[in-house]
Image: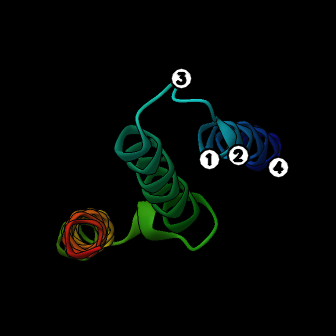
Amino acid sequence: MATLVKVWIVLVVLTLISMWAGAVQDGAIPILAQVAVVVAVAGVKAWTILQHFLGLRSAPGGWRALFAIYLIALSGAIFAIYTAGTVLASRAHVISGSLQ
């Protein structure tokens, strides 16, 4: 039981880190870095939950590898979609600004 409490505390700390990274303003940290931190922390939290609360720690290696690949691919896709949206939005803003 003590291990799960420690893991829960780690998850709370990771949540606070994610909240801090998402709330930073005034250009202290570039937006893409903020998004990268939030997505990375979410991936670590998901992996921690899978390992400790859903029993993946005692599962065969193939299952652990499958879920690790899935989390990495999902995190990468979320970051790539956000980045692509940011780039496309900035280009649309530049194009619409030049037409006026």
Pick whichever of labels 3 and 4 is earlier in the sequence: 4
Q: Position of residue 69 (x, y in %)?
A: 19, 68
* Residue topped by disc 2: 19
Distance (Cα) linking label 3 and label 4: 40 Å
Disc marking residue 22: 1
SS at badge 4: loop
Q: Position of residue 30 (x, y in %)?
A: 40, 34
**Do the numbered discs 3 and 4 sit on residues whose CB atoms are within 8 Å?**
no
Amino acid type of the residue tagged 4 in the rendering: Met
Question: Foreground: 100 or 67?
Answer: 100
SS at badge 1: helix
SS at badge 3: loop
Pick whichever of labels 4 and 2 is earlier in the sequence: 4
Instruction: Tell me what residue is drawn at x 43 percent, y 56 percent.
Output: 39
| Mark 3 Cα-neighbour bin, 10 Å: few <14, some 14–19, many ≥20 | few
Q: Is residue 17 above or below residue 58?
A: above
Instruction: Tell me what residue is drawn at x 78 percent, y 39 percent.
Output: 9
**Do the numbered discs 1 and 3 sit on residues whose CB atoms are within 8 Å?**
no
Instruction: Tell me what residue is drawn at x 82 percent, y 49 percent.
Output: 1
Question: Foreground: 48 or 62?
Answer: 48
Disc marking residue 28: 3
Distance (Cα) linking label 2 and label 1: 5 Å
**Do the numbered discs 2 and 3 sit on residues whose CB atoms are within 8 Å?**
no
